[in-house]
Amino acid sequence: MAEQNAILKVGDKEVELPVLTGTAGHSVIDVRSLGASGYFTYDPGFMATGSCESEITFIDGAKGILLHRGYSIEELARDADYLEVVHMLLHGEAPDAETYKEFKQTITMHTMVHDQVNNFFRGFRRDAHPMAMLCGTVGAMASFYHDDLDISDSEQRIRSAYRLVAKMPTLVAMCYKYSIGQPFVYPSNELSYAENFLNMMFSVPAEKYNITPAVARAMDRIFTLHADHEQNASTSTVRLAGSSGANPYACIAAGVASLWGPAHGGANEACLNMLEEIGTVDRIPEFIAKAKDKNDPFRLMGFGHRVYKNHDPRATVMRESCHEVLAELNLQDPLLDVAMELERIALSDAYFAEKKLFPNVDFYSGIVLKAIGIPTNMFTCIFALARTVGWISHWHEMLSQPGQKIGRPRQLYTGESQRSYVKIDK
Ligand code: SDX
């Protein structure tokens, strides 16, 4: 892939660096040999730094394109279900009908968790944030599964991947049930992945939960829209944790922790809270002014993206899903009116156009999740559930690549020069 070289001239030095070109997107300057020149690159926030080579997902931020294994997110959201996307992210190809049937059965057979997991929850406060419970219980999974911790064995890596994809809905539903004081609901093998999750969330021993097809379809689509997104903060966290040889459950727990932040996966919860704070369309200008005020730390949650500078294709699909779900459930949600008007005003405001701030995946997801009956403080857990396949696919890909090294960035040191220590009694 090295087609040409870049020449770096600095001081009296001239360094030649290979330029690597992929299938699409930016070519990269390979700086792995740069250290010998006495220089490092410097890129806090990784604004222009590629951390790895990957075949899983491609994003074109300027054109608003998102591909998983070459398939556009729009087509996958329309024509595939989440487990088909899971299969292609993990294995590289969409399953044919026969493979899909076997794959679905395999995942289904891993949906239960060890019954002692119930005891972990007993230690949490009932009002603990569900992400705190999820972070703890995912990491603790390593205490139950000792037959898939040899990360050098591809088969064991895939088995742990299947376990995680299968068990996340069960763990997320347990976080919810524990927080509302209802008994845990076991998985049901005759239900689809999304139906099973909804059933574990909303059924109670006293009465059957009637699954609405529109709700199950919307839930499945939300999982697909959140499945993977290249080298975002939480995926990079999982890769870095995995580069030290940590077990898959510890790595995914690290991903859950990173996703929790309001600048990342926590934005869907923060966005709905913001829409509720705005409350009515006439208060939108007040919040737009706050978002533009340099002295005000307030940001429009659900707007902006490090990569997308045109539009987030997932937001477009999510907006359509929003209208469909509310119409099919015959629901009116004034927050949708606020969201639509906020989007309209923001997109016509020079500040947002100049800063390339568009609604991202988190902007509409909260409204759909609320319409489905998911409480706001569970939104990021849903994101973590869906993103687990992306995290574990990148982890598996990294460990499959030859010459994989531990991630260890360098720094620009601006601290004290060496000085002598004076003993305290002097
Ligand atoms: C996700 O990376 C991924 O792929 C993530 C994700 C995934 O699928 O994994 O897509 C999921 O995390 C989506 C993003 C969810 N976060 C939010 O909605 C929170 C609100 N958005 C921002 O915090 C922000 O836009 C980020 C974090 C998403 C992106 O930040 P960047 O790229 O580091 O940009 P920045 O913070 O440097 O902002 C650039 C400018 C700044 O103004 P100046 O200092 O240049 O004057 O734009 C302004 C910011 O103040 N700005 C905003 C804004 N976002 C950026 N101003 C108002 N409202 C906002 N939302």
Image (cartoon, rainbow, N blue to C red):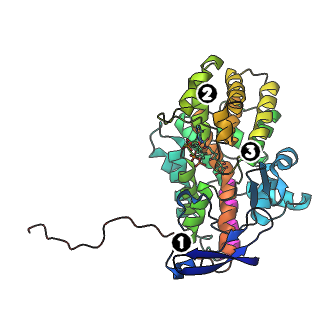
From the image, tell me which residue sits under label 3. 310
Mark earlier in primary sequence (2, 1): 1
On the image, the x and y values in percent for residue 233 come to 59, 55
Q: Is residue 57 left or right of residue 80?
A: left
Along the line of sight, the residue nearer the viewer: 376 or 334: 334
Mark earlier in primary sequence (3, 2): 2
- Cα–Cα span, label 3 and label 2: 23 Å
Residue 117 versus residue 13 in the image, above or below? above
From the image, tell me which residue sits under label 2. 275
How would you classify the magenta stretch by its main secondary structure? helix
- Cα–Cα span, label 1 and label 3: 36 Å
- Cα–Cα span, label 2 and label 1: 41 Å
From the image, tell me which residue sits under label 1. 244
Residue 285 versus residue 246 in the image, above or below? above
Q: Residue 152 got which mark?
A: none
Q: Amino acid at mark 3?
A: Asn
Mark earlier in primary sequence (1, 3): 1
Q: Amino acid at mark 2?
A: Leu
Q: Quadrant of ligand 1?
A: top right
Question: Which element type, helix, strand or loop, lies under badge 1?
Answer: loop
Task: Find the magenta span and give its range.
Answer: 153-166
Residue 156 is drawn in which quadrant?
bottom right
